[in-house]
Image (cartoon, helix red, strand yellow):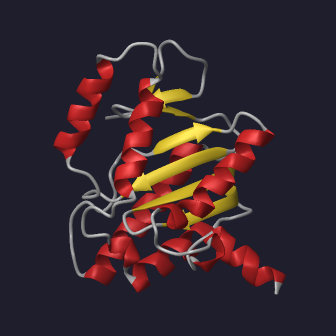
Amino acid sequence: MRDQKHPYGPDGWHSRGYLPHFDGGEIPQFITFRLADSMPQQLLQRWRAELSNEQNIDIDAALRRRIENYLDQGYGECHLSNSGIDELLQNAFLFFDGHRYRLTAWVIMPNHTHLLMTPCAGYELSSVLHSLKSFTANEANKLLCRKGQFWQPESFDRWIRDADHFEKVISYIENNPVKARLCAKAEDWPFSSAWFRKRDKK
């Protein structure tokens, strides 16, 4: 489906399906994308149905929390824990840092990844993510000797409201492996900005 502008929002809002997205120019964005097999579709449909009956809640935020907690359990084949795939992905993130976007924080988990990035002038978030996901999907499938969908088509993105939100998102991203009990300290996880920052301080 081609992007549709959000009919009730300002310029920049669009959707390819269930999730709204915001292309706001040079605004920091918290992005999550996940592997195609990282969640059963039936579970998502059930959660959407349950949340649609709730009142006085932010349905998108509530759904996002459920998804993120579920992803940390490591459902699916977890291709991103493959030592060649995680390195491929991290190198792809870093390649256009400072050109297409400014990358502030990232983490590569077994079945999903989080980024905090700010698109550079002249680059829309949607095109940046499409390019990243397309390239990494093709290269990962080659390394895995497989075909088919690698990433879930939709991504979560949230624009950063203020400095406090910015700091909280960095902490959330870098501590995700600790929360998922994959390591004791954020800087111990080698495919993350926390590990890079610790290395650069040495």
Percent position (x, y) of residue 162?
A: 77, 36
Looking at the image, which is closer to me, 83 or 21?
83
Observer able to see residue 15: no
In this rendering, is residue 92 above or below 69? below
Q: Left of 141 or right of it: where is 8?
A: right
Q: Which residue is drawn at the image coordinates 38% and 41% (left, top)?
A: 66
Farthest residue, direction left: 42
Residue 96 percent location from the top left of the image = 65, 65
Asked if one can make out residue 123 in the rendered structure from this viewpoint, the answer is: yes
Answer with left or right where residue 78 lies relative to residue 97.
Answer: left
Please tell me in which quadrant of the rendered image residue 145 appears: bottom left
Q: Toward which corner of the image does residue 72 lie, by quadrant?
A: bottom left
Query: Foreground: 25 or 56?
Result: 56
**Image point (52%, 44%), residue name:** 126
> What percent of the width, then of the height, locates residue 201?
83, 81
Name the spot of residue 165 as percent of width and height, x first: 71, 40
Report the quarter where the C terminus lies.
bottom right
Residue located at (49% from left, 72% from top) = 89
Whether 116 is drawn above or below 23: the answer is below
Where 14 falls versus 125 (above or below)?
A: above
- Count of numbered circles in the view: 0
Look at the image and tell me in which quarter the N terminus lies.
top left
* Quarter-of-image position of residue 139: bottom left
In this image, 7 relative to 186: left or right? left
